[in-house]
Structure formats: structure tokens, C-alpha cells
Image (spheres, rainbow, N blue to C red):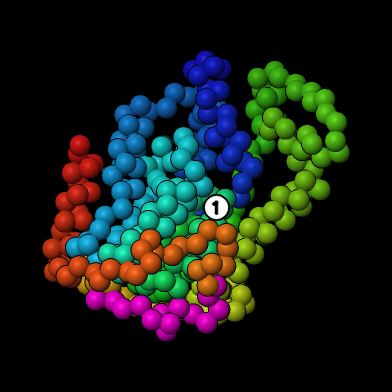
């Protein structure tokens, strides 16, 4: 691949290195491998890229079940905005999720929101902001987070702020923590006969530029950034679940993925059930002040309100059979994937 062709990935590589990640270790290894290949000049798999784009297109479409429950899928790696990473992974973005949630809350015919989650997490950028959107949304309508079948790291972070978390019997939850990654290319450059010199103004401006080694001071700084991201995650999860930060740090898996029995025992989820079960319950849900925790901010706590569009909410349409709702939801996803 020419430098010109590889250059299109420069912004993606820079983003991945500059922002900590809240993701499962296995998926971080996959992302690191993809980026390493781009750095080495390997051409991307065009067929895989096209498939990922199709998956993203069908997964990001919010679907109304029976006109009363809005199902919002969260699949794949999550990023703050649509970019080449989300294109390659078939994942979603915090921007699109925020838009879908706000539309659901503003729709007077939607009585409850269900997040259908199967994600290893993603980048920390945007996670706290989306968590706050979920917190505000649950003061207006019930918000259910369904782990079907993976809810980890940056996916669990905002979903902890839902009214309730439900896990499928074979689901895995947790992996609460943050990473940062850095490739020291010093030896690789030496083998290529390249000796890099960097001219810089600013004491720390050239730390690690071009894959050069990191000083102890630089490592301490990067570790501080990761710990800061972890602290914000812990704070949001504690607020969402109504527990102390210490309870999250020491009792929510401590960075490990756990099964549903362990998740329920340590407070990661509220109940065990399928997506069909959750849609059925959400279809008959009635919001009340008891559905929101005492520490929830009012809908107008920030500049952007999530009020229903109509001054007087319309009466929700008749509740259809939840089994039919789920079948229609799956059929629409399949049609979008094929089309």
C-alpha cells in the first residue's frame, strides 16, 4: 500500500492512541492488530469492510415494537462518532445512540425504551456524556438495558444508568476498566535502518512521537489519563446503580467479565431474562417517580432537555403481542442486513 493510501488511516491510528479504551482485552487485541497492519502498509479486506458497513447499517436502526416500546440496538465496538473504526467493526456510535434515545423520549407513543446490547465496549470518549443522557431519560420513561449477550466496559458504563439491567441466561457482563495502548517502534525502525530525529518546542510535546520510546515520566502521565477515565466510569456506574464507588471498584467483577449468576450476585444486573421477556414487560410498563432513583437529575438539569414533544402526551396505542413485536424486530433487522 502506498503512503498515500495508508495515510487515510492516520486519523484513526491517532485517535486510537490518544484516547483510553474501555473494552474487553480480547477485542482490544483485535483493534491493535488491525491498526498494526495499517501501520505496516497492509491493505484492508474490502469484503470484510463491506460486510461491516452492512452490519452497521442494519444494527443502528431503532425499531418501534408495537408502537409502544422503542428497541435501540447496541452492537459491536462503540466509538464517539462515525469513523473508519466503526466502519471496520460494524459497531455503533455514541452520537447515533444519543439521537435515537432522544427521539424515543420525545415520541409520545413510546412508553418505554429497551436497549438490545451485544457489545465488548469501545472508546471512553463520549461514554460519560451518553450515560448522563440515559440518566435523564429514565426520569421521563422506563429505560431497560438488555444484555443479549455481551455488555462489557464502555457498553456497560452507560447502561448502568438505565432503570433496570436484564441479562439473558447465557450473557456475560462487566469488564469494568480502562486501557491505553502504545507501540514502541524503536527496534523495528532500527532494523529498517531508520534513525528518526524529532525537532520540537515544548517540554512534553514529542513524547512518543513516531513510535519512539517513552520515558518514565511519560508513562506516569499516560497512566494518569487511564486512571482518570476509569474514575469517571466508576462514578457514573455508581450513580446509575445507586451504590458507592467503592462497591463498584471492589464488587463489580474488578475488571473481569462474569456470568449472569455472578453478575446478579454482585449487583451488575437486576434480573435474568430474554429480550422477549424484557419487551413484554416494557410493553406494559408505567413510569412513576419510583422508577427513577432519588439522585437522578431533573430532565432540565442540562442545556438540552429530553421532554416529550407534545405538551399533553398522547395515550399510547394498544399494546400488541410481545412475541409478534420481537419477530417483527428481528425480521426488519434481517431485511436491512440483506438489502
Viewer-nearest residue: 52 or 116: 116
Please give the range of residues in magenta. Answer: 284-297
Q: Is residue 148 visible?
A: no
Viewer-nearest residue: 290 or 49: 290
What secondary structure predominates along the stretch shown in magenta? Answer: loop
| Mark 1 secondary-structure assignment | loop
Which residue is identified by label 1?
Answer: 126
Residue 173 image position (x, y, % from top left): 42, 66
Residue at 57%, 59% in the rendered image: 303
Q: Is residue 49 left or right of residue 234?
A: left
- Quarter location, residue 162: bottom left
Q: Is residue 214 left or right of residue 155?
A: right
Residue 63 image position (x, y, % from top left): 26, 55
Q: Is residue 54 visible?
A: yes
Residue at 71%, 49% in the rendered image: 222
- Quarter location, residue 274: bottom left
Q: Is residue 137 left or right of residue 147?
A: right
Amino acid at each position: 500500500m502506498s503512503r498515500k493510501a495508508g495515510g487515510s488511516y492516520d486519523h484513526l491510528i491517532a485517535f486510537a492512541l490518544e484516547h483510553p479504551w474501555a473494552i474487553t482485552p480480547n477485542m482490544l487485541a483485535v483493534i491493535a492488530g488491525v491498526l498494526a497492519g495499517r501501520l505496516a502498509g497492509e491493505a484492508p479486506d474490502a469484503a470484510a469492510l463491506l460486510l461491516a458497513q452492512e452490519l452497521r447499517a442494519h444494527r443502528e436502526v431503532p425499531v418501534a415494537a408495537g408502537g409502544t416500546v422503542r428497541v435501540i440496538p447496541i452492537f459491536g465496538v462503540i466509538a464517539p462518532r462515525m469513523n473508519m473504526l466503526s466502519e471496520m467493526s460494524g459497531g455503533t456510535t455514541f452520537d447515533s445512540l444519543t439521537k435515537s434515545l432522544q427521539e424515543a423520549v420525545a415520541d409520545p407513543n413510546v412508553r418505554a425504551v429497551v436497549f438490545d446490547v451485544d457489545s465488548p465496549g469501545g472508546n471512553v470518549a463520549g461514554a460519560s456524556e451518553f450515560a448522563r443522557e440515559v440518566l435523564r431519560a429514565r426520569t421521563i420513561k422506563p429505560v431497560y438495558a438488555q444484555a443479549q449477550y455481551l455488555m462489557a466496559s464502555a457498553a456497560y458504563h452507560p447502561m448502568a444508568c438505565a432503570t433496570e439491567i436484564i441479562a439473558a441466561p447465557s450473557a456475560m457482563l462487566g469488564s469494568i476498566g480502562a486501557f491505553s495502548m502504545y507501540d514502541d517502534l524503536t527496534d523495528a525502525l532500527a532494523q529498517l535502518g531508520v534513525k528518526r530525529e524529532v525537532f520540537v518546542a515544548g517540554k512534553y510535546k514529542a513524547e512518543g512521537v513516531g513510535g519512539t520510546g517513552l520515558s518514565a515520566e511519560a508513562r506516569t502521565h499516560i497512566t494518569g489519563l487511564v486512571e482518570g477515565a476509569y474514575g469517571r466510569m466508576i462514578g457514573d456506574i455508581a450513580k446509575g446503580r445507586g451504590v458507592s464507588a467503592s462497591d463498584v471498584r471492589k464488587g463489580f467483577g474488578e475488571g473481569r467479565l462474569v456470568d449472569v449468576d455472578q453478575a446478579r450476585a454482585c449487583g451488575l444486573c437486576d434480573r435474568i431474562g430474554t429480550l422477549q421477556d424484557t419487551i413484554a414487560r416494557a410493553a406494559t410498563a408505567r413510569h412513576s417517580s419510583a422508577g427513577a432513583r432519588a439522585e437522578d437529575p431533573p430532565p432540565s438539569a442540562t442545556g438540552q432537555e429530553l421532554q416529550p414533544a407534545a405538551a399533553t402526551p398522547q395515550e399510547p396505542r394498544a399494546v400488541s403481542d410481545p412475541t409478534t413485536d420481537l419477530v417483527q424486530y428481528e425480521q426488519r433487522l434481517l431485511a436491512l442486513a440483506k438489502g
